Structures are given as structure tokens and as C-alpha cells.
Amino acid sequence: MIIFGNALVSAVCCEKLKNSDMWCQSVSNQNQCEGNPYFIWKNIQTCDSVPECSGTCVNANSGECSENTAKTQCGKSGGVWSEKSPGEIDECQEVCCLLGQDAYFINPTECKAMFTQNNIQGIIREDITSRENCEEMRSNLKVGACVVSTLTEKICNISTSLDCTGKDVKFYDGFLCTASIGTTRISDCAKSENTICKDNKVYYKDTCGNIANVYDSIKYSSSDYWTYIKDPYNSNDVCTVSSLGSKSCGNCDPTENTVCKDYKDTTLSKPSNNLGGLVCGDLSCKYEGKIYEHGESWCEGTNGTFEIERDLTTSNIFKSNITALKNVNKYNIPGSKYYKLVCSSGEVLVEECGDYRNSVCIQGKNEVGNMEASCTFNNWRTCFQIDTKTECEDPTALCKWIPGYRWDSQIVSEEKRKERQGSCSPLVAPGFDFWKGNSQGNGICSMGSAQEYAMFETGIWSNRDNMDEWHDNTLANDCINGCYALPGYAEEFNQKAGEEKQYPEEINCVGVGGQCSMYDILTEFYDESEFNLPASIGSYHLSDRRGQYCNKDGDQTHWLTGAITGESYDCTPGAGSEAKDERKERDYPIYLTNQEWLNGITERARSLGDCGYKVSINGKYSDPETEIITAIFQKMSQKGAVKENITVEQIIYKGGKAIQGELYETTLPYTTTIYSCVSDYKGICTSADTPSLCEGGEQNADATCPEKTVCCVYPELI
């Protein structure tokens, strides 16, 4: 038995495709569609069968008719939508539009717009139904001076014989309004030095405002030149201009690389007999004091952007540009936007790059030395999926490496620390419509949150739950673990401006001083227990507890007790080989000083977008509460067991600076946002107490998160 059958594959029609400007697209899964307020039509073959996808959109300004346009797309563009085809819509039909001495075969809306633009009442001939017949009308139109005489004046304008009709009206074929017949002037209009740009040429204007002949400084005094209309395309009647331009002749020709321009925008001097100062300049553009060739493009932005340049042959962004863009407090701040500018036939055209810095302008010089620019997609989301310094710092990518915390919160081995202990972050921070309470922005910004544990010893009579009561270097000296989270820790060893993080294999401080900075010295101190500091450990805001540097048996979670003195530490005091001493040394921490920790987490948070405490383009800062560090104190036994679960919390940092915040009671467990609860870093562990849980995303019940948190997956991270 042979059974024949067929199956209809049902599809989905998206009114608008997600993350795209494409409308009415057939897809296999409705998750590919943009949701509310856009429609999703299910169980159909193609979008062709959806009436709302196949109508005609009539542009209200130009009258242009676009077929097969989505109804909502048409409305958003300001057009009028109809289910009819263009042939059934009156506004889409072309007519013969007579305007002065010209005839155009266009739609009625375009024709009326030309009447308004030229301040001339033309004629619409609906009886002429072909382009050929319409253009024939142009050759039959005579142009000249139309004079209306009254008892007191003679009013004149240049028009066609068709338009010049009525009582006491006389038409002078081929004459200007400034003409004289014999010794009698035909109107009250006189010649003037006023000039105007029309059709990319420079024309004289008479005292009545009528356009006269092409500007020619030599023929300004010629009566013939102010009597008869001269054909600008007849070289026997009118002056000509070379490709270098001219300040004396206004017969510009774009095909010869000249256009009408203000002389100030050219290299030409001020013209004579020309009050308007208009000349025939070349196709270059003068912009903010700089000359750009025709076709050149370059970048510009609002306050807070940076002119990014790259090598066009390799696509590499220049290293100095990458260094500058790392300054998240100066560049790509909230409200900033990139633009591409193009010099086109002497005019500067502006093209907007994407909103929220989703695309940025990057420029470079081509092989002939001219500037080329393009609005380049800022694919900042891919940075989060890179976990090596080398790949992140690819000079063609818009990413940067921030040493310290990883996005997956892991601590790699000391051997891999330089290459893998850090976060690959956007070089150009994206923006969000945060003023709407956008969940996308909240989800991304929450990735910058961090939680750190610091342990320090106190005397039995010491107040251990208020950092304001700790003075000098007592708190730092008594620290055992996570010391860089303590305010001011190792402040004598902070990096200087412009100093980048170094690793032990890159440093060789033979002796104290020399070419080594204090930060270099501290790096070697952590890596080599026999390396001496310039002064005793107790002289600095450093830990003098042996457990900060040594462990008991190679296990980083078990530390030695007791204090150390002198300029270095020894993990086997009194006995033990060098090999044993090295085996018991703890790995040097991912941050060495409190300032390095603050700089790292601050830059990482602010690089995520319009996050943290930043100044915007209007000069105002965001709410200091958007960047805050709190300390939660917990009393523990000498063995590390929690003695009391009722803790005290204190704000120690807010809005970019350390503060002395008030103490207040809090209850553990204390949870913060932890990133990466789903593979490929696509999920965020969010507190289960959040009112709008996973707003804008979906909860992943199979993912693992800390207690009292859930995993939220957001589409923009996928």
C-alpha cells in the first residue's frame, strides 16, 4: 500500500521583526517578532495574505506612493495608508505641472509643493496624461517681462506668456524687467548688485527681487546685459567658469566641479559688483575652518564623544584612541551621540549614527590622504563573551580589558592571571532609555555589582562594627583576607596616573627604587617573600598578619596565624626550605590596593552603559545612589565561624568618593546581583525580593543561583 499525503507548514507573520527595521516578515517562530504594540499573525503561509501588509503608503509631504507597505510602518513615517493599489488612488496619479517656464510630469502633491516653494502660482494640467506631451509644453512657453501698469507705478516680474494675462498687462518676450526701449524703462525695476544662488549658479537680482542674468562683474555696467535674457548655457552670451572656480563669473557648472558658494567658504577673495558675496567655488566644503574635498566624510559628535580613527588598510583602531576611550568619565557619557558628515558638491550633509551609541562613527585616511568615515555597529554585547585579554584587545574590536573580576566571578590560577583574570567590557559604553525605568538598562547595569569579603582581627575591647572609629593604619595592619576592599588599604602603593597594571613576570626590581614604582615594588613583594619594602610593613597601610601572605599547607583557604615584622614576610619562620616557603605562599591577590579595586569596579560598572555616577552632556551628574558601597559587619570567632547573625551595615562610598555613612541594622543573608547563572554569560542572578522580578526577561528555573535569588535571562544578552 502506498499512502500519499501532504502537509501545510504553518508560519508566522511579524508586523515588525525583533531588533530590526524590517516589516511584515514571515518567520518560523513568533519569538522572532517584536511584541506589543506590534501584531503577530499566526498559522498563515506568508505575509502576502495579510491585508495590513500589502497596502499603499502615500507620503503626505511629497505625494510619493509606496506599494506593499505595512500599515503601522506607514503611520510611523507620517504617511496615509490605503488598501488600494497606487493606480486606484488620485494622489498617486501624475499630472503636467506648469511652473514658470518649466513643465514637470509629477503627482499633484509635489506640484503644489513647488508652487509654495517658489512662491509662484503655476498651473496643473490634468488633461495631459503623458510625460512626452507635458515636456512639449516647455518648448512652447515664452519667457519675458510681465508689466502691470497703474496710474502711479509699473510693476514687473519675470514669467511666461501663459501666466501674463489681464487688463493693463503687457508681456515683453525675452526682456528683463530692467530693460529700456529707446529711452523709456518698461518698469520701475532697476539693476542692483544683489546676487542669489539658483540651480547652482550665481544670478543678479534687480531692485524688485526678480532674477536677472548670470552674475558677471565685467558686464555689470552693460545696458545690453540688463535688457535681454541671456541663455546661461550659451557661451556666446554668458561668461564661463573653469574647474578652479571664479570670483568674477557666476556661471557655475557642477559637471566641471564648480557650484554656487559664499566666497568665505572658498579660497577666493571677495567679488566686486556682488553684494551677496556669492561666487563659483569648487566642490570642496569649508567646515569649522578646515577644507574637505568633495566626497570626503568625517566624524563628529555631541559633547562627550571622541573622534575615533583607524587604519583603513588593517581596520585597526589606533592605540592612542583606545587609550583615550577608556576614560568612561569623559567620553561616551549619557546623552552623547555620533554623527557622520559628508562633503557633497560643496554642501556638508549630516548622517546620524544609531541612537544610544548602538553605532559609532569611525574615520581614517584613504590611500590618497582623504578622510573616510562610517557609522559602525557597536557590537558591545559580544565583549561579555570574551574571556582572554589578547582576544579582547583585538584592535579591530570595540572592547577593552579591565583586570580584576571576571564576569563569571571565577579566580583563575596565578599563571593565567594576566591573560584571564579580568572582564572584557565595551570600549564605547552603550546607552539606555533609563528615564523610562527600562528593564534592559537595569539588567545590564546590575552586572557591575560586586560582593567582597574582608576579614580583620580586633581586640576584645575594640568596636569592630564602625569603620569611622578606626584610625591611622590599624584596620589595614590587622587584615587577614580580602584586604583591598578596606578603605585606604596600601594607599602608599597606589598606581600613578597612566600607570598600567603590571605582573610579576614583567617586573624585576633588583633593589628598591630605580625604575620601579611603588606599585611595582608591592607586586614583587607579594610574589617574592624575600623582597624587602623600603620600610617596615607596619609603616604602611598594609596587613602585618602572616595569614594575608601565607597559608598552612598550600590550601588558600587555610592561613597561618600570627604577626610579621620587618620589611618582608617569611612563610616558614625559623625553619623550612625555600621550596617549602614558596609552596606556602598565597597567590598574590587580583587587586593590590583599595584604590585599584575601586578603579577596577568603577570603570567596569560605568563601561556597561549609562550606569553608575556619571556626568551627562548637560553637565549634570546622575544620582549618587547609583554608585554605592556598603560594609556589613559580622562578628566571627578566631576560627572563622559566625558568632552573631545580626549585623550592622554602613555606607562607606557613594557617588565616586568615600564617605562616613551612618550605621543601621540589617539582617543576613545579604545578597547582591551576581552575573552568569546560564552558560555563555546570558543570565543574571537577581534578588527574589525584587518587585518586578525578571521584568523584560524570562526566569530560568534550571539555572543555579545563590539562596534567595533567581536566574533572569534577558533577550539583549543572547
Image: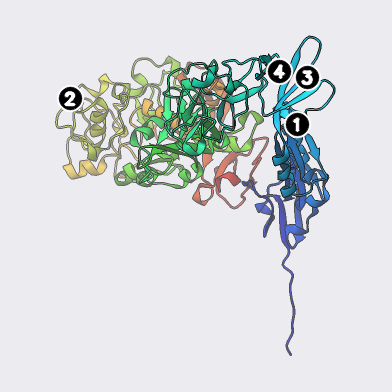
Q: Circle 2 is placed at which residue position?
A: 513
| 561 and 300: which is toward the camera | 300
> How far, Cα to Cα, is label 2 from label 3?
96 Å
Q: Earlier in the sequence, mark 2 or mark 4?
A: 4
Say what amino acid the circle numbered 4 marks: Ile
The answer to whether residue 144 shows anywhere in this view is: yes
Vertical placement of 89 versus 298: above or below?
below
Residue at the extreme bottom of the image, as rendered: 1
Q: Provide residue 694's location: percent of width, then percent of height.
A: 64, 41
Q: Earlier in the sequence, mark 2 or mark 1?
A: 1
Say what amino acid the circle numbered 2 marks: Gly
Q: Earlier in the sequence, mark 1 or mark 3?
A: 3
Which numbered tag is attached to residue 161? 1
Local crowd at mark 2 within 10 Å, few (<14), some, or many (≥20)? few
Residue at the extreme left of the image, as rendered: 510
Circle 2 or circle 3, nearest the eye: 3
Q: Secondary structure at mark 1?
A: loop
Q: Circle 3 is placed at which residue position?
A: 148
Q: Secondary structure at mark 4?
A: loop
Which numbered tag is attached to residue 186? 4
Q: Earlier in the sequence, mark 2 or mark 3?
A: 3
Q: Quadrant of the N terminus?
A: bottom right
Residue at the extreme front of the image, as rendered: 182
Q: Earlier in the sequence, mark 3 or mark 4?
A: 3
| 584 and 361: which is toward the camera | 361
